[in-house]
Image (spheres, helix red, strand yellow):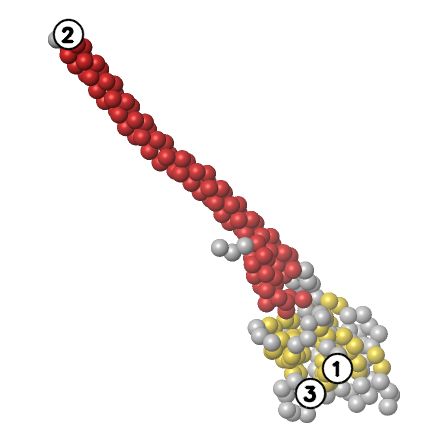
Amino acid sequence: MPDSFSVLMLSFSLCLHYVDCDWSVREPLNHILNDDGSVSVTCMMDGNEKFQAEAKLKQDGEYVCQISDTDNTCLWQYNNKQFTFTLKNPKGLNNGLFSCEITKTKPFPVKRKEGPQVKLFRGCKSTFKAVQKSNCSCNNQTVDKDPTPKFLYLIVCALIMTMLSLYSAILTAIFIRSRLALKQENPDTMTYVPMQRSVKRREQENTLYVDMHKKQKHDYHRDMSHNSH
């Protein structure tokens, strides 16, 4: 029968199994218009867990750059949980909605998450002087979206641990109650058998006493009869 410690360890292992809930994907950051007309967009993820990941950049719901691309229209580099994509021939920058998609590949299970969509370079011009790199200072417009709260999965794990702890406490109480009931039944059975034996022994002694009394009375009458003769 499982005890409370085993149930708590099981719940703790379940939470460790779903520890990937501690990381999330940000909106595209550090978008830069380069001097050659290309655009650099950075995708970043938050979290303390270390794992292997793949990233993709999406524009209007379609992939425009990913790390598996082999052509020269898109370049990428990775550094400190940041994937920087460089689009050489960008289109629709002023009205396009960009988002980052990051997939955790190892360790298992595989988990894919997508960040919120934003409009990049809104109202900015892409004409710059030669040998100049400029960060666009226009504000990003985040599309309304209901992202999953960071602590939602932690709350679920806490609820699972609470339910398992309650279940363990109920099982432990039932087990202790059954043991106490069993101990209360055993002494009654042990004291019942000697009482039956003692009653039988007394009956035998009383029977023997009656027989001896009758014998003594019979011998007395016989002596009286003998003396009368």
Residue under the image location 47 percent in, 44 percent down: 178
* Whole-percent x, y for residue 122 in the image: 77, 73
Q: Is residue 163 above or below residue 145?
A: above
Residue 117 left/right relative to 173: right
Residue 191 left/right relative to 78: left
N-terminal of the pair, mark 2 or mark 3, is 3
* Whole-percent x, y for residue 172 in the image: 53, 49
Q: Which mark is residue 161?
A: none
What's under tag 2, amino acid-wise? Answer: Ser
Secondary element at image label 2: helix
Secondary element at image label 3: strand
Q: In terms of depth relative to the viewer, which is nearer, 210 or 154?
A: 210
Residue named by callout 1:
79
Q: Nearer the viewer, mark 2 or mark 1?
A: 2
Give the CA distance from mark 2 to mark 3: 147 Å
Q: Which mark is residue 228?
A: 2
What's under tag 3, amino acid-wise? Answer: Cys
